[in-house]
Amino acid sequence: MYEEIDVISHSCVRIQGNATVYFDPFEMPDAPHDADIVCVTHDHYDHFSPDDLRRVLHDDTVLVVPKSMEENRELTDMHRRHLVHNVHFMAPGETLQIGDTTIETVRAYNVGKNYHLREYDWVGYVLTTNATRYYIAGDTDAHPENLFISCDVALVPVGGTYTFDAKEAADFVGKIRTQAAIPTHYGTAVGHREDGARFVCEVKRAHPHIQALERMRFALSRESLRRD
């Protein structure tokens, strides 16, 4: 089930169906140039990677980024060099319709730590496509602005330090309304490869009504590919 979802590496998610939608392309092992839409949650290097963006973009790709990235130099340079043509800047709480695909933004921020502050206006996304609502949380903790989420599938960070750890993420998906949950943001830039399995076990133990699935491919970085 949910075979249309592919967690390629870290927080890099691809959802295929009515449109091919990427979130936070990072450590792409190949260059498929197949993205109809790319959504970026914030401008940290492991979420906004111009090199990886170029590997999924084609001439008609729509790029969606937080409004707070309007002055981002790397993004401005990509636009100046005609590497990206169609960019939408979204503030938290906004909705965008692209063909049959609906994109909503939800604030993503930390509580009790200073890595992702609320005032930065960084976001997660609720994507509605394939007659399914997908919540891609971004780098976040639980807070009053994301506990109202209602979705079919929640993709949540579990690597700890900068976001939820596996236990906190499991507690979070038990509080929102979702039918399934998939771990992200672990085993590469932060966390351990075992964090995904820990999350799945914790969800199954504490919230057996939620289907917990691992979808991480742990794609080899291009540096690893070159070394081989």
Image: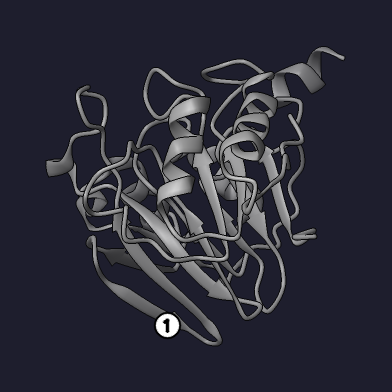
**Residue at 41% from the left image edge and 59% from the top image edge:** 125
Q: Give the percent coordinates (x, y) of residue 121.
A: 20, 49
Q: Which residue is mark 1?
A: 97
Q: Is residue 147 left or right of residue 223?
A: left
Question: What is the quadrant of the C terminus in the image?
Answer: top right
The outermost residue toward the bottom is: 99
Picture quadrant of residue 206:
top right
Q: Is residue 188 left or right of residue 5?
A: left
Picture quadrant of residue 225:
top right
Front residue of this view, candidates 172 and 192: 172
Front residue of this view, candidates 99 and 130: 130
Whether residue 83 is visible here, answered yes or no, is no
Question: What is the quadrant of the N terminus in the image?
Answer: bottom right
The outermost residue toward the top is: 227
Whether residue 105 is visible here, answered yes or no, is yes
Picture quadrant of residue 103:
bottom left
Question: Which amino acid, by three-letter code, is at mark 1?
Answer: Gln
Q: Give the percent coordinates (x, y) of residue 2.
A: 75, 60
Q: Is residue 102 above or below residue 56?
A: below
Q: Is residue 115 above or below residue 150?
A: above
**Residue at 43% from the left image edge and 66% from the top image edge:** 150
Q: Is residue 63 above or below residue 114?
A: below
Front residue of this view, candidates 104 and 50: 104
**Residue at 25% from the left image edge and 44% from the top image edge:** 143
Q: Give the percent coordinates (x, y) of residue 48.
A: 44, 40
Q: Secondary structure at mark 1?
A: strand
